[in-house]
Image (cartoon, helix red, strand yellow):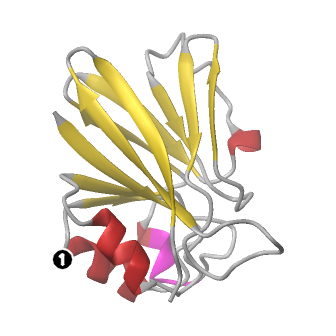
Amino acid sequence: MTIVGVISDTHSLLRPEAVEALKGSDLIVHAGDIGSPGIIDALSEIAPVFAVRGNVDKGEWASKFPQDEVVEVADKYLYVLHNVNEIDLDPAAAGFEVVVSGHSHKPGIERRGGVLFVNPGSAGPRRFTLPVAIAKLHVSSQGIDVCIHELTLL
């Protein structure tokens, strides 16, 4: 089993609660709106990181991150982008089991056309009354399980 920690919309704030929740991950996916390069450096101390650029990620440091990314985990493929409304392909036809996105700050898990759509919500600054959260994918040859972890903030 491979554990994939999923985080998004940190907006330059990597909460200690998010770091703690991501411990034990075999790899981490950041679905954009990173905010500053130090976020990726800190996450890299936990596990290897795959990250995409979000709409707030500007400047030279952000240009090294792609708009979208394909991540292979245990012979399964994840498609990662920041804003799911900007998806320009049919993920099922392209062979993706999971689409990971952020942007809305609203955590959610939904299955559409055989593809799992996961938004971990925002792990950075709270927006409105939405929870601060991350997600974890448990990937094995038998399939993919996902859960949202709402963070208890101290």
Is 61 or 135 nearer to us in this picture?
Answer: 135
Quadrant in the rendering for residue 102:
bottom right
Vertical order, 81 against 34 (above or below): above
Q: Residue at x 55, y 82 (%)?
A: 35
Q: Quadrant of the N terminus?
A: top left
Q: Is residue 136 magenta?
A: no
Find residue 65 and report its horizontal and vertical position in percent. Answer: 44, 64
Vertical order, 30 against 43 (above or below): above
Mark 1: give few (<14), some (14-19) or many (20+) Cα within 10 Å: few
Left or right: where 115 falls relative to 96: right
Left or right: where 125 falls relative to 75: right
Find residue 150 and report its horizontal and vertical position in percent. Answer: 54, 62
Amino acid at circle 1:
Glu
- At mark 1, the secondary structure is loop
Mark 1, residue position: 45
Find residue 101 and report its horizontal and vertical position in percent. Answer: 59, 48
